[in-house]
Amino acid sequence: MKRFLTGIIVLTSLLITPGCSSVPKSGETQVSARDSQHTDHQHDMSSDHQENSMEHTGHEVNTKITTQAKLTKPKNIVPNQSVNLVINVQDTAGKSIDKFDTFQEKLMHLIVVRDDLATYDHIHPTYKGNGRFEVSANFSSPGDYSLFSDYKPSGQKEAVSLMQVKIPGSVPLPKNLEKFEKTKVLSNTKVNLNFANKNISAGKEVTLNFDVKDAANNQPIKDLQPYLGERGHLVIVKSSSPLAVSDYIHAHALKNSADGQIQFVTSFPQPGTYKLWMQFQRNGKVDTADFWVNVV
């Protein structure tokens, strides 16, 4: 079995209300979090404990369990180089959770963002059995990163763990955030974000409509391909310091939208500034359109 560099472990406890080789280890921390509930439409290593929650309307459930996810990473990480990560999912007694349900075609979705939300990566760890997931990640620049691990123990709701990783070095100065622009052009595709009301209100359901058009002729795209089993994939993170599990929203695309439209119904739990990353597939290539929205 391939051995990684001596690692540091982040331990993330998850309270789930039901509804994804070996590395030497040298340290542990704990951050507690609660389950993620969804609709069909829709650290720098210390020993501190934080309680975070994220609520969405969700799947029916029958039981309640508590799990913990351990992140193992190399002690020294160099920016913009591939690094091997291991995530072990256990119950609070230390017994591995060995069965996971597939959702959006994967057993685990790992969302990696720099804490200023300037960077985004969506990767899928490989399940090795006995609660163990492995993935190769790349942290593009120095800074503090948050890793949202989204998975579904068998028979339970989706659960989200939050883990922090610090990449040493000089953190890049922030660029102009292009906040609140509603149009992005990605190679040959133009994406417009629309929502019914002028303002998005915290706690109220909102439909986010992404118009996807051909950049050359401004006509609705008719050749969108399914991505992760849906018309599109949407992750939303609230701009906060520090980031918490409650800042993370994972919405599911509506079925049977018109040509050139990808729609999501969700809600924003608190007022503030949020960043959206909407991913879609065309001509075998996955593109990511990012937008900022203000919630009142």
Image (cartoon, helix red, strand yellow):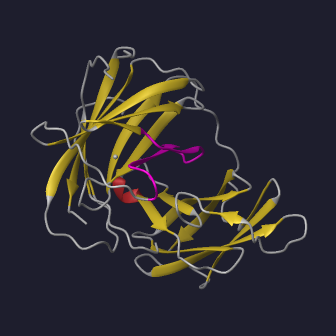
Would residue 106 be counted in the magenta stretch? Answer: yes
**Residue drawn 29% across the image and 72% down it:** 59
Q: Position of residue 130 (x, y in %)?
A: 24, 36
In the rendered image of this protein, does residue 261 appear above or below residue 272?
Answer: below
Q: Position of residue 77 (x, y in %)?
A: 48, 21
**Residue drawn 47% across the image and 43% down it:** 124
Would residue 175 be counted in the magenta stretch? Answer: no
**Residue drawn 72% across the image and 74% down it:** 260
Residue lying farthest left? 93
Give the quarter of the figure containing the N terminus: top left
In the rendered image of this protein, does residue 62 appear above or below residue 256?
Answer: above
In the image, 91 versus 242, the foreground residue is 91
56 left or right of 183 in image: left
**Residue 200 seen by the camera:** no
In the image, 215 versus 10, the foreground residue is 215
Magenta segment range? Answer: 104-125
In the rendered image of this protein, does residue 12 appear above or below residue 254?
Answer: above
Q: Position of residue 230 (x, y in %)?
A: 54, 65
**Residue drawn 35% across the image and 54% down it:** 245
Residue lying farthest right? 217
Q: Position of residue 218 (x, y in %)?
A: 86, 72
